[in-house]
Image (spheres, rainbow, N blue to C red):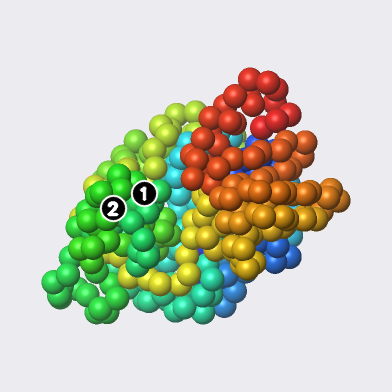
Amino acid sequence: MNHTYVIIMAGGIGTRFWPFSRTSYPKQFHDVLGMGRTLLQQTADRFDGICPPENIFIVTSSLYKDLCQQQLPQLSDDQVLCEPIARNTAPCIAYACYKIAQHDPEANIIVAPADHIILKEEEFKRTIQTALDATNGQDILVTLGIQPSRPDTGYGYIQYVHSADTSESNSQIKKVKTFTEKPHLELAQQFVESGEFVWNAGIFVWNVQAIIKAFETHLPEIAEIFEEGKEAYYTDKEAAFIDKAYSLTKSISIDNGVMEKAHNVYVVLSDFGWSDLGTWKSLYEVSDKNEDFNVIDGHIMLYDTKNCIIKTPKDRLVVVNGLDGYIVAEYDNVLMICRKEEEQKVKNFVADAKERGAEFV
């Protein structure tokens, strides 16, 4: 029996990618990179050879169950876990881990978001295997940390201990000292210069007994709620149980709820061409650019335009003249033109568009 499992978190709306990412069709279900596979499909593909297809679980909103099954037809109903309401990552991970534990108490689990880009797939697989070897049978929680290439304020940072630890069988695995969420620029610069910090990739590895113990210690109310589902998982009672469980559970991230509190957290130092693809600027950074440093996807004519990302429908001719450093994005009757450096305003645009009518968000 193969004891390796993958949980893919695919429930987010991706507001910062508006108008491309919408409530009815979030970014993880789009072919963002123009590679013929959506982000969700690419994420599932990434684990070929790491675990069998029947050991992959998707946690998503009940709104997106059909989309998940269309894009990953190899998954059974039991492998698509539907959340009735969004409750952040701790309940999402608890649901999947308690369900897997019911089936396989020796499970060794990888948790990954559905919307990340990984450019060096083989290096990623090697890193994941290093983490799986470390967590197999050990009471530790492992996260992947990315060597920072710049002082980015949009990522969380992990500080690790440099000194040799007897429990470290691999120099790539380090004991975690602190977590810091999205620091301001000056602090981010200090972090990168110190050489003691890595970006928090939000990809986790642990065995099912270690994470259940961590929930019981740090989020006992969540542990109690999902522990009660033992009789319901893999039966026709599961959906009703989960509706009730989610009405009782609080909204909290796994980072705040468990990882920042636990003392048995380790980080695998990683470098596999990672981006969390959270924003237009992050898509710009990982995409191929033309000689004027433009990223273009669509039927586009450019004049005197540079440093832009332009993504528009293939059936519409778009002419752009005289722009430098802009996002031009059109999808489903919404056109957005915004300075790349001011992409944080996208969330405000979405809030204002919501007031104009649901069809815009």
Query: In the rendered structure, are the residues bearing label 2 and label 1 in contact, judged by CB atoms less than 8 Å apart?
Result: yes
Residue sitting nearer the eye, 275 or 234: 275
Q: Is residue 160 visible?
A: no
What residue would you read off at disc 1? 153
Picture coordinates of residue 330, whole percent (x, y): 72, 43
Q: Cα distance, mark 2 to mark 1?
A: 6 Å
Say which quadrant the C terminus sits in: top right
Q: Residue at x 36, y 61 (%)?
A: 150
Tell me the amino acid under the disc marked 2: Ala
Q: Residue at x 84, y 48 (%)?
A: 316
Q: Which badge, 2 or 1, comes first in the chain's sequence?
A: 1
Q: Residue at x 77, y 55 (%)?
A: 300
Kindly give the residue lying farthest to the right in the view shown: 315
What residue would you read off at disc 2? 188
> On the picture, is 166 further left or further right than 66?
left
Tell me the amino acid under the disc marked 1: Thr
Residue 247 versus residue 278 in the image, above or below: above
Secondary structure category for the residue under label 1: loop
Picture coordinates of residue 145, whole percent (x, y): 35, 64
Secondary structure category for the residue under label 2: helix
Residues packed near mark 1 inside 10 Å, few (<14), some (14 to 19) or many (20 plus): some
| Quadrant in the picture for residue 157 | bottom left
| Quadrant in the picture for residue 355 | top right
Residue 333 versus residue 118 in the image, above or below: above
Q: Is residue 308 visible?
A: yes
